[in-house]
Image (cartoon, rainbow, N blue to C red):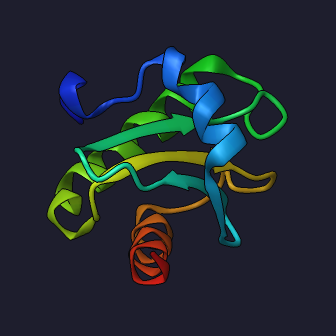
């Protein structure tokens, strides 16, 4: 699980949505803001993607785990991973490859 110091608080969301850059992937969209200070992340999974809370939470935990493993590859900045529809059935290997492709695009 990603440590709390590497997670985004709700107060940063508005700046990210207004000033952040978009990076698109088949599984999710990443809002990215390069502030140069530290690496912070958030994962958003809407109810339209997975209706059951325990499914959303397990996918969120899995994504945080993947981000934690690849933390050194990210540039300093704030990242929000917003999942798209039909990603609920995604496997861990698919998520890892998509996160790695996002890292290359930044």
Residue 50 as seen in the image, left or right of residue 62:
right
Q: Which of 1 and 30 is in front in this view?
A: 30
- Where's residue 81, x and y in %? 55, 48
Q: In this view, does 26 lie to the left or right of 92?
A: right
Residue 1 showing in the rendered view:
no
- Residue 57 in the image: x percent, y percent? 50, 26
- Image x and y of residue 90, in percent: 59, 60
Kindly tell me whether residue 7 is visible in this rendering: yes
State the quadrant of the C terminus. bottom left
Task: State whether residue 77 is above or below residue 6.
Answer: below
The N terminus - image quarter: top left
Height in image: 35 above or below 97?
above
Taking the spot 65% from the left edge, 35% from the top edge, the residue there is 45
Vertical position of residue 88 compared to residue 2: above or below: below
Which of the 4 image quarters holds residue 100? bottom left
Residue drawn at 22 percent across, 63 percent down:
70
Depth check: give the residue in front, 34 or 27. Answer: 34
Q: What residue sits 47% from the left and 65% below the top?
A: 95
Q: Specify whether 53 is left or right of 39.
A: right
- What is the number of callouts on the image? 0
Q: Residue 79 location in percent, x, y?
A: 46, 48
36 horizontally vs 81: left or right: left
């Amino acid at each position: 699980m990603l440590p709390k110091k590497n997670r985004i608080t709700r107060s940063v969301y508005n700046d990210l949505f207004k000033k952040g850059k978009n990076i698109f992937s088949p599984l999710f969209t990443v809002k990215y803001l390069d502030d140069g200070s530290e690496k912070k992340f958030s994962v958003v999974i809407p109810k339209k993607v997975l209706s059951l809370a325990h499914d959303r939470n397990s996918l969120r935990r899995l994504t945080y785990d993947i981000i934690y493993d690849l933390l050194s590859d990210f540039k300093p900045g704030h990242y929000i991973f917003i999942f798209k529809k039909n990603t609920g059935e995604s496997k861990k290997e698919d998520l890892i490859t998509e996160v790695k492709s996002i890292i290359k695009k930044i």
